[in-house]
Image (spheres, rainbow, N blue to C red):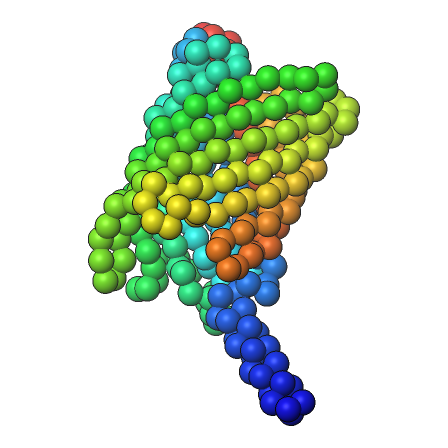
Protein backbone atom coordinates (compact mmCIF):
# COMPACT_ATOMS: atom_id res chain seq x y z
CA UNK A 1 0.00 0.00 0.00
CA UNK A 2 2.82 2.38 0.94
CA UNK A 3 4.57 1.63 -2.36
CA UNK A 4 1.38 2.49 -4.28
CA UNK A 5 1.02 5.79 -2.41
CA UNK A 6 4.67 6.69 -3.06
CA UNK A 7 4.32 5.75 -6.73
CA UNK A 8 1.17 7.87 -7.06
CA UNK A 9 2.88 10.81 -5.36
CA UNK A 10 5.88 10.58 -7.70
CA UNK A 11 3.58 10.40 -10.72
CA UNK A 12 1.67 13.51 -9.66
CA UNK A 13 4.93 15.31 -8.91
CA UNK A 14 6.33 14.44 -12.35
CA UNK A 15 3.16 15.73 -14.03
CA UNK A 16 3.35 18.99 -12.06
CA UNK A 17 7.04 19.53 -12.86
CA UNK A 18 6.50 18.68 -16.53
CA UNK A 19 3.60 21.14 -16.77
CA UNK A 20 5.64 23.90 -15.10
CA UNK A 21 8.48 23.32 -17.56
CA UNK A 22 6.14 23.43 -20.56
CA UNK A 23 4.52 26.73 -19.50
CA UNK A 24 7.53 28.43 -17.94
CA UNK A 25 5.63 28.79 -14.68
CA UNK A 26 8.73 27.96 -12.64
CA UNK A 27 10.81 30.68 -14.32
CA UNK A 28 11.24 34.34 -13.37
CA UNK A 29 10.19 36.33 -16.42
CA UNK A 30 10.51 40.04 -17.12
CA UNK A 31 8.51 42.86 -18.68
CA UNK A 32 10.37 45.88 -20.09
CA UNK A 33 7.96 48.76 -20.61
CA UNK A 34 7.63 52.33 -21.85
CA UNK A 35 4.64 54.63 -21.20
CA UNK A 36 4.30 58.15 -22.59
CA UNK A 37 1.61 60.81 -22.25
CA UNK A 38 1.89 63.95 -24.37
CA UNK A 39 -0.43 66.91 -23.79
CA UNK A 40 -1.39 68.48 -27.12
CA UNK A 41 -4.34 70.70 -26.13
CA UNK A 42 -6.08 71.95 -22.98
CA UNK A 43 -8.30 68.85 -22.85
CA UNK A 44 -6.41 66.40 -25.07
CA UNK A 45 -3.32 64.23 -24.69
CA UNK A 46 -1.87 61.26 -26.59
CA UNK A 47 -0.99 57.98 -24.88
CA UNK A 48 1.86 55.84 -26.25
CA UNK A 49 3.06 52.51 -24.91
CA UNK A 50 5.41 49.64 -25.75
CA UNK A 51 5.99 46.46 -23.75
CA UNK A 52 8.44 43.64 -24.35
CA UNK A 53 7.63 40.54 -22.29
CA UNK A 54 9.84 37.48 -21.84
CA UNK A 55 9.40 34.09 -20.18
CA UNK A 56 12.87 34.56 -18.70
CA UNK A 57 14.77 37.66 -17.54
CA UNK A 58 16.34 38.56 -20.88
CA UNK A 59 15.41 35.74 -23.27
CA UNK A 60 12.61 33.51 -24.51
CA UNK A 61 10.15 35.90 -26.15
CA UNK A 62 6.59 35.84 -24.85
CA UNK A 63 4.79 38.98 -26.02
CA UNK A 64 5.12 42.31 -27.81
CA UNK A 65 2.47 44.89 -26.94
CA UNK A 66 2.08 48.25 -28.70
CA UNK A 67 -0.71 50.57 -27.61
CA UNK A 68 -1.82 54.15 -28.29
CA UNK A 69 -4.86 56.23 -27.45
CA UNK A 70 -6.43 59.69 -27.36
CA UNK A 71 -7.15 61.01 -23.86
CA UNK A 72 -9.84 63.58 -23.09
CA UNK A 73 -9.32 65.27 -19.72
CA UNK A 74 -12.66 65.94 -18.09
CA UNK A 75 -10.71 67.42 -15.17
CA UNK A 76 -7.33 66.99 -13.48
CA UNK A 77 -8.68 63.84 -11.81
CA UNK A 78 -10.89 62.31 -14.53
CA UNK A 79 -9.77 61.10 -17.96
CA UNK A 80 -11.52 59.15 -20.72
CA UNK A 81 -9.58 57.34 -23.45
CA UNK A 82 -10.28 55.71 -26.79
CA UNK A 83 -7.39 53.58 -27.97
CA UNK A 84 -5.94 50.79 -30.10
CA UNK A 85 -3.41 48.08 -29.37
CA UNK A 86 -1.48 45.46 -31.32
CA UNK A 87 -0.30 42.37 -29.46
CA UNK A 88 1.93 39.60 -30.80
CA UNK A 89 2.11 36.59 -28.46
CA UNK A 90 4.11 33.38 -28.48
CA UNK A 91 2.07 31.10 -26.17
CA UNK A 92 4.74 28.38 -25.94
CA UNK A 93 7.62 28.25 -23.47
CA UNK A 94 10.80 26.86 -25.01
CA UNK A 95 14.39 27.26 -23.91
CA UNK A 96 15.85 27.66 -27.39
CA UNK A 97 14.22 30.95 -28.36
CA UNK A 98 16.53 33.93 -28.69
CA UNK A 99 16.20 37.46 -27.34
CA UNK A 100 13.94 39.55 -29.56
CA UNK A 101 12.57 36.73 -31.70
CA UNK A 102 8.91 37.64 -32.17
CA UNK A 103 6.64 36.93 -35.13
CA UNK A 104 7.10 33.15 -35.07
CA UNK A 105 4.74 30.85 -36.95
CA UNK A 106 2.85 29.70 -33.87
CA UNK A 107 2.28 33.24 -32.63
CA UNK A 108 -1.12 34.75 -31.86
CA UNK A 109 -1.82 38.19 -33.35
CA UNK A 110 -4.35 40.47 -31.73
CA UNK A 111 -5.81 43.83 -32.73
CA UNK A 112 -7.51 45.48 -29.79
CA UNK A 113 -9.81 48.47 -29.38
CA UNK A 114 -10.34 49.79 -25.86
CA UNK A 115 -12.35 52.40 -23.97
CA UNK A 116 -11.09 53.60 -20.63
CA UNK A 117 -12.03 55.83 -17.70
CA UNK A 118 -9.53 56.91 -15.02
CA UNK A 119 -10.58 58.52 -11.76
CA UNK A 120 -7.98 59.88 -9.29
CA UNK A 121 -8.22 61.00 -5.67
CA UNK A 122 -5.86 61.70 -2.76
CA UNK A 123 -6.15 60.73 0.90
CA UNK A 124 -3.38 62.33 2.93
CA UNK A 125 -0.13 61.45 1.13
CA UNK A 126 -1.69 58.42 -0.58
CA UNK A 127 -2.68 58.85 -4.23
CA UNK A 128 -5.40 56.52 -5.51
CA UNK A 129 -6.17 55.77 -9.16
CA UNK A 130 -9.17 53.75 -10.36
CA UNK A 131 -8.93 52.53 -13.95
CA UNK A 132 -11.95 51.01 -15.71
CA UNK A 133 -11.39 49.52 -19.18
CA UNK A 134 -13.45 47.71 -21.81
CA UNK A 135 -11.67 45.81 -24.60
CA UNK A 136 -12.77 44.37 -27.94
CA UNK A 137 -10.17 41.78 -28.92
CA UNK A 138 -9.83 40.61 -32.54
CA UNK A 139 -7.62 37.53 -32.30
CA UNK A 140 -5.97 35.59 -35.11
CA UNK A 141 -4.25 32.20 -34.75
CA UNK A 142 -2.98 29.68 -37.27
CA UNK A 143 -6.21 27.69 -36.76
CA UNK A 144 -8.96 30.28 -36.24
CA UNK A 145 -10.02 33.94 -36.05
CA UNK A 146 -12.38 35.09 -33.32
CA UNK A 147 -13.47 38.08 -31.20
CA UNK A 148 -13.46 38.31 -27.40
CA UNK A 149 -14.74 41.03 -25.10
CA UNK A 150 -13.24 41.82 -21.72
CA UNK A 151 -13.62 44.22 -18.77
CA UNK A 152 -10.76 45.27 -16.47
CA UNK A 153 -10.56 47.16 -13.20
CA UNK A 154 -7.31 48.34 -11.62
CA UNK A 155 -6.90 49.97 -8.21
CA UNK A 156 -3.51 51.67 -7.93
CA UNK A 157 -1.93 53.25 -4.88
CA UNK A 158 1.10 55.58 -4.90
CA UNK A 159 2.94 56.81 -1.81
CA UNK A 160 5.66 59.49 -2.12
CA UNK A 161 8.65 58.85 0.16
CA UNK A 162 10.21 62.20 -0.76
CA UNK A 163 10.49 64.42 -3.84
CA UNK A 164 12.40 61.72 -5.75
CA UNK A 165 11.44 58.30 -4.41
CA UNK A 166 7.99 56.73 -4.23
CA UNK A 167 6.22 53.40 -3.76
CA UNK A 168 3.61 52.06 -6.17
CA UNK A 169 1.22 49.10 -5.91
CA UNK A 170 -1.87 47.90 -7.75
CA UNK A 171 -4.25 45.02 -8.16
CA UNK A 172 -6.02 44.48 -11.48
CA UNK A 173 -8.87 42.07 -12.18
CA UNK A 174 -9.71 40.83 -15.71
CA UNK A 175 -13.28 39.67 -16.35
CA UNK A 176 -14.26 38.00 -19.63
CA UNK A 177 -17.66 38.92 -21.04
CA UNK A 178 -18.03 35.33 -22.25
CA UNK A 179 -17.11 31.97 -20.71
CA UNK A 180 -14.97 31.51 -18.72
CA UNK A 181 -15.77 34.62 -16.67
CA UNK A 182 -12.47 34.88 -14.79
CA UNK A 183 -9.57 35.95 -16.97
CA UNK A 184 -6.65 36.80 -14.72
CA UNK A 185 -5.51 38.88 -11.76
CA UNK A 186 -2.35 40.95 -11.50
CA UNK A 187 -0.84 41.99 -8.17
CA UNK A 188 2.06 44.44 -8.40
CA UNK A 189 4.47 46.29 -6.12
CA UNK A 190 7.33 48.61 -7.07
CA UNK A 191 9.72 51.32 -6.03
CA UNK A 192 9.96 54.37 -8.28
CA UNK A 193 12.30 57.29 -8.86
CA UNK A 194 11.48 60.71 -10.36
CA UNK A 195 14.30 62.07 -12.49
CA UNK A 196 12.17 65.16 -13.08
CA UNK A 197 8.52 66.18 -13.24
CA UNK A 198 8.37 64.61 -16.69
CA UNK A 199 10.47 61.43 -16.42
CA UNK A 200 10.32 58.58 -13.90
CA UNK A 201 11.20 54.88 -13.66
CA UNK A 202 9.76 51.98 -11.68
CA UNK A 203 11.27 48.64 -10.76
CA UNK A 204 8.84 46.09 -9.40
CA UNK A 205 7.45 42.59 -9.11
CA UNK A 206 4.22 41.24 -10.63
CA UNK A 207 2.31 38.10 -9.64
CA UNK A 208 0.18 37.17 -12.65
CA UNK A 209 -2.53 34.67 -11.66
CA UNK A 210 -4.56 32.61 -14.14
CA UNK A 211 -6.89 29.71 -13.36
CA UNK A 212 -4.53 26.91 -12.39
CA UNK A 213 -1.28 28.80 -12.97
CA UNK A 214 0.80 31.68 -11.59
CA UNK A 215 3.65 33.58 -13.21
CA UNK A 216 6.31 35.71 -11.52
CA UNK A 217 7.48 38.72 -13.48
CA UNK A 218 10.03 41.44 -12.81
CA UNK A 219 9.12 44.80 -14.32
CA UNK A 220 11.24 47.73 -15.43
CA UNK A 221 9.22 50.69 -16.70
CA UNK A 222 10.04 54.14 -18.07
CA UNK A 223 7.39 56.88 -17.85
CA UNK A 224 7.46 60.14 -19.82
CA UNK A 225 4.73 62.73 -19.27
CA UNK A 226 5.21 66.04 -20.99
CA UNK A 227 3.29 69.06 -22.28
CA UNK A 228 3.94 69.64 -25.97
CA UNK A 229 1.99 72.92 -25.86
CA UNK A 230 4.58 74.41 -23.52
CA UNK A 231 7.48 73.26 -25.70
CA UNK A 232 5.80 74.68 -28.81
CA UNK A 233 5.27 78.05 -27.12
CA UNK A 234 8.90 78.16 -25.92
CA UNK A 235 10.17 77.37 -29.43
CA UNK A 236 8.14 80.23 -30.86
123 with respect to 33 (left or right): right
Work out which residue is located at the far right of the displayed protein and give it.
162
Asked if residue 55 is positioned above or below residue 149 in the image, the reply reads below
**Residue 164: x percent and y percent?**
73, 26
Quadrant location of the N terminus in the rendered image: bottom right
- Based on the displayed image, in which of its 4 quarters is residue 14 positioned? bottom right
Asked if residue 25 is positioned above or below residue 216 in the image, the reply reads below
**Residue 161: x percent and y percent?**
77, 27
235 vs 112, nearest the viewer: 112
- Residue placed at 40% from the left, 60% from the top? 91
Quadrant location of the C terminus in the rendered image: top left
177 vs 81, nearest the viewer: 177
15 with respect to 196 (left or right): left
**Residue 156: x percent and y percent?**
59, 31
116 with respect to 112 (left or right): right
- Residue placed at 55% from the left, 57% from the top? 214
Work out which residue is located at the far front of the displayed protein and give it.
1
Q: Is residue 68 visible?
A: no
214 with respect to 195 (left or right): left
Q: What count of labels does the image hold?
A: 0
Asked if residue 13 is positioned above or below residue 150 in the image, the reply reads below
**Residue 121: x percent and y percent?**
59, 17
Amino acid sequence: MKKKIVSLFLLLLSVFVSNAQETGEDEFGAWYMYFGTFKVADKLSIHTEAQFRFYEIASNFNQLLLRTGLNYHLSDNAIVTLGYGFIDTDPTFTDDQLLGAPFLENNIDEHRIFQQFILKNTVGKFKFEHRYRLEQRFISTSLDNFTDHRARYRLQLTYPINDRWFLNAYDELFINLQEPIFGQNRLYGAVGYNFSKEISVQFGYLKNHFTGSNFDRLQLALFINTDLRKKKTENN
